[in-house]
Image: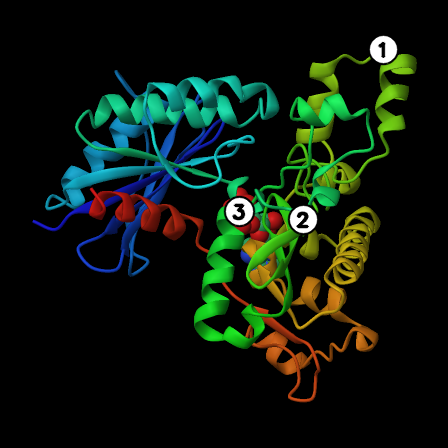
Amino acid sequence: MDRHVLTLNAGSSSVKFGLFDIEREPTQIADGEVERIGDVPRLKITDASGETRADHALRGEGTAGHAGAINAILAEMDTHFPDRHIASVGHRVVHGGLDYSRPCLIDEKVIGDLTELSPFAPLHQPHNLAGIHAAREAFPGAPQIACFDTAFHHDHPWVNNVFALPQHYYDEGIRRYGFHGLSYEYIAGELKRIAPHLYAGRVVVTHLGNGASMCGLQNGRSIGSTMGFSALDGLPMGTRCGQLDPGVLLYLMDQKGMNADEIADLLYRKSGLLGLSGLTNDMRTLEAAGTKEARQAIDYYVFRIRRELGALCAVLGGLDAVVFCGGIGENSRMIRSRVLQDLGWLGIEIDHAKNTDNARVITTELSRARVMVIPTNEDMVIARAAAAHFSSR
Ligand code: ADP
């Protein structure tokens, strides 16, 4: 019986998962999600050929919470993939703090450390931990591996790490950590494989999903990113604000009497594309909407990406390549073409036909910098880490 790795990404109201065969190079055989946890959860499983294997609501005993979701995933996999043998479980964990710079085996100490980091990522870390607890119960014999979104940025230069606050805040961990590290690690690995000369150069990766950030890579290593202390900074996102003058927060507290919970709700859930458009956080819907507010939301989104691209190029001292990834980066021709227009001064000349075709390279032969579209795969990075741990035992 082949050995498998289960990857888990537990969020506030969802658990996303992937099933990988690790007998040789990890190969994905299924993925899926339980969404709407806390309401009426719904389970969806798709196999590697894209065929839907399950899509139904979860009702009844034992289906509540993250534990219920994981048990439902397991029961469904028993039906559809009866030959699986889960050798280890890999978890996406948003925050590894100062100490966790690579994947690690989860034990009581790690759980204690990650729990202590929860105040740094209150909207993500507790849910990641809930997933870990539920998986440990469901697979008591399997090693559980934590993979961190912050780890890829661990060796950022100090100037990209620091805020200009009194030094003791930095020492306490109030720093720019950066996130989406699993996605950047995957893209760096793909670049090394398919375009090693670009991997060795100056690259800006633009991850545009529901969350969005950009990262400057030099020689495959992160030297700067747009997300900072939290996953709020940098680009506007589906429902998150992106860069904001801290004076706005002071005003909201002083003049509007808003407390921390209300401000968190505003900045994480009601801002970004949703806040600006008053309509939706979903780019596809926005593109189709055609209202003035929808257009303005897109205008601001594009403006910020271009601005951060310029800033990261200055930090990198030039540009050899841009990579687009994430649901919007991989699919929205319109966003890519608007971001890339009139960037001749950066050596970018877009090939509109290739962009429309969603080609891997969307710049002309003569373009000095190359722009690529590379589908990201955070689950694969987790699966590889979990498989590597298993084979090294
Ligand atoms: P998550 O960060 O939750 O993994 P995704 O990476 O799947 O999210 O990105 C979701 C976003 O991608 C949504 O805003 C969705 O509208 C957008 N998207 C997906 N396909 C397209 C498309 N063909 N055109 C424009 N936007 C798209």
Disc assigned to residue 152: 3
Q: Residues within 10 Å of mark 1 (few under 14, many from 20)?
A: few
Looking at the picture, how far across and down is residue 263, in whole percent?
A: 75, 21
Dot 1 amino acid type: Gly
Q: Residue at x 68, y 50 (%)?
A: 224
Q: Earlier in the sequence, mark 2 or mark 3?
A: 3
Dot 2 amino acid type: Ser
Give the left or right position of residue 181, taking residue 279 as reference. left
Mark 3 Cβ inside 8 Å of ligand 1 = no
Give the left or right position of residue 200, taking residue 167 as reference. left
Q: Residues within 10 Å of mark 3 (few under 14, many from 20)?
A: many
The CA distance from mark 1 to mark 3 is: 38 Å
Between residue 44 and residue 340, name the one nearer to us.
340
Q: Quadrant of residue 180?
A: top right
Dot 3 amino acid type: Phe
The CA distance from mark 1 to mark 2 is: 32 Å
The residue indicated by pointer 1 is 257
Q: Residue at x 12, y 51 (%)?
A: 2
Q: Is residue 2 above or below residue 345?
A: above
Q: Residues within 10 Å of mark 2 (few under 14, many from 20)?
A: many
Disc assigned to residue 225: 2
Give the left or right position of residue 149, taking residue 285 as reference. left
Disc assigned to residue 47: none
State which mark lies toward you, 1 or 2: 2
Q: Residue furthest bottom?
A: 366
Identify the image's colour scheme: rainbow, by chain, secondary structure or one colour: rainbow
Badge 2 element: strand
Badge 1 element: loop
From where the camera sits, is residue 273 visible? no
Looking at the picture, how far across and down is residue 11, in whole percent?
A: 47, 31
